[in-house]
Structure formats: C-alpha cells, structure tokens
Image (cartoon, helix red, strand yellow):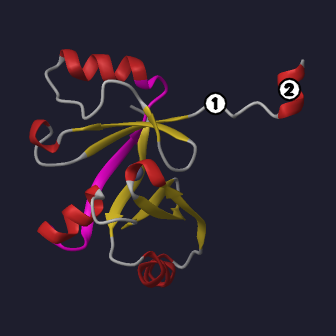
Amino acid sequence: MNKIEHIGIAVNDIKVSGSLYEKLLNTPVYKVEEVASEGVKTAFLQCGLNKIELLEASDDNSPIAKFIAKKGEGIHHIAFEVDDIVFEMKRLKDEGFVLLSDEPKLGADNKLVCFVHPKSAGGVLVELCQEASPRPSPKEREL
Ligand code: ZN
C-alpha cells in the first residue's frame, strides 16, 4: 500500500462541515460529488499529500446515515492508495480479512474502491482505492 489517500469523515451537512474544514485546514473544498450507488454526497479538501473526504448521507438507507445514528459525526474510514486493487483484495482475503465486496466498485473521485470490514481490521473501516483508468473520450473510442 502506498500511502493514506484520504480520511473519510461522516457529517450531517457537507456545506456546514465543508466551511468548518476550510477554516481548519485553510484550504478550499475543491470537489463536491454525489455517489448515488452508495447513498452519499462527498466533498474533498487537499491536505498536503492526503485528502479529507466529508461524507453526508443522501438518503436514510445510506451507510453514513446508519453510522451517524449510531456514533454521531466523526471519523468514518481510512483509505489507503494501492496500485493494484484486485491483487490487494486477494492478498487481504488470503490473510483472513473480510471484504465488503467481491469486486472493486467505482467510488468518488474516479477511484476503484473496496472496503475491509471493521470487525476484521481492529475496529477501523479500511478502504482500498486505486485511480480508475480515465474514461476514453468519444474521439479516442473511434480510433
Ligand atoms: Zn473514502
């Protein structure tokens, strides 16, 4: 694993928390993105080599809604950057870690992601993420 790519923080309102973290880190939110499949709205701030990802539930069944109902706002997950997510998923599975999906999924920020169950990772929800290949432009597809 290369580095901590980002830390995910569950919040009630990404606008309110976005301005809080802008003040805290003295840097602007540079991207806001909804991941409908996961029921979350995300906002990203850069902090040196790493990022902070704020997560707001976009519906009541969202894992973020459940997390906040149980624990309140706060650190939700730690994401590690990997070069080959399929390889790392197999490696972790062989080591006995429980993965939340069998295949990598497309997450926020153009990343392929997979989560490791906190029960198998010392109480921490761990995310693996790999930069997804850029989508070919229509022009490139013709070639
Ligand atoms: Zn994340």
Label placed on residue 133: 1
Residue 14 or residue 8, whichever sits in front: 14
Q: Quadrant of the N terminus?
A: top left
Q: Residue furthest front?
A: 60
Residue at x 40%, y 66% (from the top left corner): 58
Amino acid on which disc 1 is placed: Ser
| Helix, strand or loop status at disc 2 | helix
Image quadrant where one finds the C terminus: top right
Q: Position of residue 39 (x, y in %)?
A: 39, 57
Residue 111 horizontal/vertical position (percent) = 52, 40
Instruction: Say the numbered circle drawn on residue 78.
Output: none
As for residue 77 lying within the magenta part, the answer is: yes
Instruction: Count neighbours of disc 1 (C-alpha within 10 A) and say few if under 14, some if 14 to 19, many if 20 or more.
Output: few
Quarter occupied by residue 139: top right
Quadrant hosting residue 113: top left
Q: Could you tell whether 68 is left or right of 12 in the image? A: left
Q: Earlier in the sequence, mark 1 or mark 2?
A: 1
Q: Return the residue at label 2.
A: 140
The span picked out in magenta is 71-85
Q: Nearer the viewer, mark 1 or mark 2?
A: 2
Q: In this picture, is 72 found above or below 34?
A: below
Q: Mark 2 Cα within 10 Å, few/some/many (few <14, many 20+)? A: few
User: Which sits in the foreground, 61 or 18?
Assistant: 61
Image quadrant in which you'd find residue 127? top left
Residue 126 locus on image (x, y percent)? 27, 43
Mark 1 secondary-structure assignment: loop
The residue sitting at 64% across, 30% down in the picture is 133
Give the distance between the C-alpha atoms of the residues marked 1 and 2, in whole angstroms.
Answer: 14 Å
Q: Is residue 134 above or below residue 73?
A: above
